[in-house]
Image (cartoon, rainbow, N blue to C red):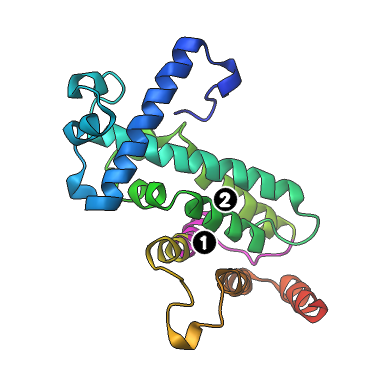
Amino acid sequence: MAVDAELDDDLSPAERRRRKVRDAIVEAAEAIFTEEGEAGISMRRIAERIDYSPAALYKYFDSKEALFDEIREQFFERLYRRMLAVEQTVAEGPQVNEECLRAYVETGLEQPAHYRLAFSGWFEAALEDRQGTYGYAASERLELMIEKAIADGWFRECDPVVAGLAVWAGAHGLTMLAVTIPDFPGAKDKCAHLCLDDLIAFHAEMTGRGLATPKLNAWLDAKKARK
C-alpha cells in the first residue's frame, strides 16, 4: 500500500470487492495470531478461516511475508494520518508532544491484535525497498517534526534520525505493554491508582525534557503550574 494509495471513494466496484477480501484475510490472520501466536499463521489456515481455497489467497498475497507487510502498512497508514492531524492542532510547543505520543498509543490500542502482528516476524527487506511506504513516511514525518522543534528552539541540537528512533522506541515500548498486559499500568497493586493517560503524560514529559532547551523546560514548567 503506497503513500499515495487511492481513497475508498475512488475505487471501482471490482477494486472494492478486492479490498474487502484483503481485509477479511488480514482479520483472519489477526484472529489466528490472537489464538495461537505467529506460529499458527499459515496461508492454508487463513484460507480455512474465511472459507477460501489457499490458491485463491495467493491472488491477493503471494506469501505470508507479503501479508505481514500489508498489516504493517495498514498500521502505519493510520499512524501517519494521526501524526498529520496532531501537527495541525499544535498552537504552541513542539509537535513531538503528549498528543503525538497519545496518537501513537491510541492507534495501537484501536486494534491490539493488528498492532502485535504488525511487529511480529519483522521483515528483512533492504531499506530502499521500504521507500514509498507509510512506514517510511511516518519515520520521515517524525524526523521532520523533530527538525522543526530544533529550528524553533524547543529541542537542543541533536541528530534528528537518532532522536526519532529514540522517540519511536519509547512509544512502541509503551504501546506494546498496553496491548499485551491487561489493565496496564494498573496491573500491580502499587500502580492501581494509575491509568494509561497518567503514564502517557509522564512519558511525554520525560521525552520532552530529555530533548529540551531551557525554552522548552520553562514552557513545560508553566504548563504544569497551570494544572
Judging from the image, what secondary structure is the residue with disc 2 in? helix
Q: How many C-alpha atoms fall within 10 Å of the one at disc 2: few (<14), some, or many (≥20)?
A: many
Outermost residue to the bottom: 190
Residue 211 lies, with reference to residue 90, above or below; the image says below
* x 47%, y 66%: residue: 174
Give the quarter of the image for residue 124: top left
Quadrant, the C terminus: bottom right
Q: Position of residue 111 (x, y in %)?
A: 45, 48
Q: Is residue 170 magenta?
A: yes
**Which amino acid type is marked by label 1?**
Val
Q: Decide if residue 45 is on the left or right side of residue 76.
A: left
Q: Position of residue 143 (x, y in %)?
A: 57, 50
Mark 1 and mark 2 in contact (Cβ < 8 Å)? Answer: yes
**Which amino acid type is marked by label 2?**
Leu
Tell me the residue that label 2 is attached to: 142
Judging from the image, what secondary structure is the residue with disc 1 in? helix
Q: In front: 130, or 194?
A: 194
